[in-house]
Image (spheres, grey):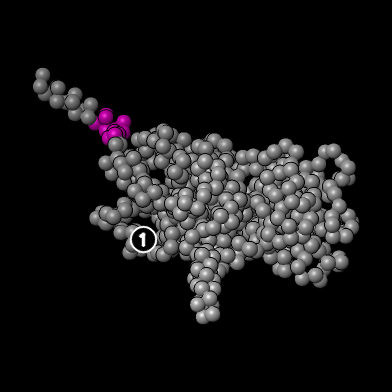
Amino acid sequence: MMIFCFCIFLICSLNTLSEGSQSGETTVGIDTLSYLHKLGYYYPEDGNLPDKQRMAEDDRIRNALIDFQKFAGLPVSGIIDRETKSLMRSPRCGVEDLASKRRKRFTLQGSKWWKKDLTWTVLNENNDGLTRHEVENVVKQAFDTWQKVTGLNFWKVDHRSEVVDISVEFHTSYHGDRYMFDGNGGKLAHAFYPNKKLGISGDIHLDDDEIWKVPGGKNEHVSRAKSLLWVLTHEIGHSLGLKHSKNRAAIMHPWYRGNKEVGLHHDDIIGVQSLYGPRNSSIILKRPTSPPPSCPNKFKAVLLHKETGNTYVINDGHVYVLGRRLGIDRGPFPVGEIFEGISHVDSLYYDNKGKIVLHYGKNYSIYEDLKGKRIESGTIQHKYGFSDDASKIDAALRWKRNKKIYFFIGKGYYRFDEAQEVLDAGYPRLIYGTWKGLPESIDSVVIWRNKITYFFKDHLYYRFNYVKKYPRKINPGWTQCTVGHLRTNENINASLIMSPSKWTIILLLLSILKFYQS
């Protein structure tokens, strides 16, 4: 009998180990891998999920789990610990978090409506006994939440109408798209981004196996019931072009928090306004009390153009183009002439794909090139994972040696892993004392044609890791403001340029010399 009991105990112990101890599983099961795959964290090379042997050999699986934990704001362990397992079992939106490593959080190209007036309808009935009137009231309330902060207008049309932009529908299980519902709990709903696919573009699908509740409705006090208002407000964000947010307080965070008051976080508002602008379109831009100076005495943002070799200096919304000899070839002119829709820039840099990334306040945009189309836009909180306290990025530098992005904010700096799309641990750190030769804070930075890194602060510029004879004045020093003939005191391939008066003196001396020789 004792032997029998011991065998049972041994079997149970082995089973427990295979499922995971209290400290967590070190291996990922097929269900977990399928979960990560559906949410965009893992993409098998051949399109098929691997078997157990291949799973054990695939390092990308652990990386996918780490990405999931980072996105969800969990402790990054790389194992299926209790907190990770609990979150994976929590109800949430069925739309992918990452979509793919090649896609960003939300884009403008193909992911926004190109009109201001959008129609919506509730296509069919539900299984919870909610009346059409109750459902439509909640849908309108959810749309109104977004309408208050954007330049969009939403109009209800009859459900029998053949032409509608956003259709709200109740479905169960497999219903004709790639997002299969899984019964009560799990995936609550999904929506389609605008212009993705004609016909279902912008549509919202709700799992009819869920118990839905509306304010004052029959299921309002049912503990397992899900807030229709919360879920609809979230899904409408997708219908407008927003992807999931890492910010746990945002309505666009993927996990259900229906017991909270339904409303938009600042992160949601900045995101949707980057696509459609604010509700009040009559914003009066501050005009300068005096015209911008003809010569840049400060470098608030600077970019060395990779094709032309020209240096673009941006100060207070105006651009100065310095040619290869550092003369003012053009400017000042409004920054919107080269970056459409932008009125000011705090910092900019080239990403690993050669695209230009701009930062302005809490927002960012990515452009194909100067005067190119804007291909992505959002908040720095979305893209990099900064806290809400980060109001702007003063300077940005992509360091080719380690392929990291350095962001300078106030007196500190951060390091961003471009491949993993996450801020590195152990930051921020102080600029002063870490970056040799620099002041406590900086305005801008550029790696120039001579491969030397220059930093700018107020009217001075600094050379990284080189204290002797620095800082120096930007003007004169980096530049001398004679239009078309600016020069630097550094040996940066700048030709020695003589003024007409110098040539006159030289010619006069040569004439005198020739006279005496004769």
What's the residue type where badge 1 is placed?
Answer: Pro
Q: State left or right for residue 100 relative to residue 186.
A: left
Q: Residue at x 19, y 29 (%)?
A: 509
Give how far across and how far down residue 159 sits, in percent: 87, 45
Q: State left or right for residue 511 relative to residue 328.
A: left
Q: Which residue has dot 1 on it? A: 439
Residue 6 lies within the magenta run: no
Q: From where the camera sits, is residue 398 visible? A: yes
Q: State left or right for residue 377 relative to residue 404.
A: right
Q: Residue at x 50, y 53 (%)?
A: 52
Quarter of the picture holding the C terminus: top left
Q: So how many labels did they put on this image?
A: 1
Give how far across and how far down residue 421 sits, in percent: 49, 53
- Give the answer, above or below, for where 514 lies relative to 453: above
Q: From where the camera sits, is residue 291 visible? A: no
The residue sitting at the bottom extreme is 2
The residue sitting at the left extreme is 517
Q: Say few, some or many: other residues with alpha carbon within 10 Å of mark 1 (under 14 / 14 to 19 / 20 or more).
A: some
Give how far across and how far down residue 297 sits, in percent: 42, 48
SS of the residue at dot 1? loop
Q: Residue at x 44, y 43 (%)?
A: 352
Q: Residue at x 77, y 52 (%)?
A: 172
Region of the chain picked out in magenta, as a range = 495-505
